[in-house]
Image (cartoon, rainbow, N blue to C red):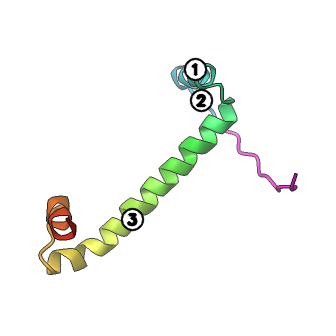
Amino acid sequence: MLYMKTAILTIRLDKELDELLSKASRRTGKNRSEIAREALRRQIRLETFEDLRRRIMPFAEARGYLTDEDIFAKIS
C-alpha cells in the first residue's frame, strides 16, 4: 500500500449535525471521517462549478444563452 501524507482538520459540530453524521455513518457503514471527506469534496466541487458558471455567464449571455434550457436545446 502506498504511503499517503494526510492532514488533520478539527471541526466543531453542533449536537444536531453530530447526530446526523452518526446516523449516516451507521446507515452507510462508512466512518464519520469518510462521510465528512466526501461531503467536503462535493461542496468544493459545487463551489468550483458555481464559480466557473458565474465567470462564463457573461460570454454565454452575449451569445443568447440565458437559461439552462437554451443550452440544452442547442446540444440536444
Image quadrant holding the C terminus, namely: bottom left
Amino acid type of the residue tagged 1 in the rendering? Arg
Q: Earlier in the sequence, mark 1 or mark 2?
A: 2
Residue at point 63% right, 43% down? 37
Residue pointed to by mark 2: 13
Foreground of the two, 24 or 1: 1
Residue 5 magenta: yes
SS assignment for the magenta stretch, majority? loop
Q: Secondary structure at mark 2?
A: loop
Q: Which one is closest to the eye, mark 1 or mark 3? A: 1
Kind of element beneath mark 1: helix
Residue at the front extreme, as displayed: 76
Give the alpha-carbon distance from disc 1 to disc 3, as whole Å. Answer: 33 Å
Q: Is residue 60 left or right of residue 37?
A: left
Q: CA distance from mark 1 to mark 2?
A: 19 Å
Q: Residue at x 23, y 79 (%)?
A: 59
Look at the image and give the residue range highlighted in magenta. Answer: 1-11
Residue 60: image location, x then y, percent? 21, 75
Badge 1 is on which residue?
27
Of badges 1 and 2, nearer the viewer stands 1
Residue 25, placed above or below residue 71: above
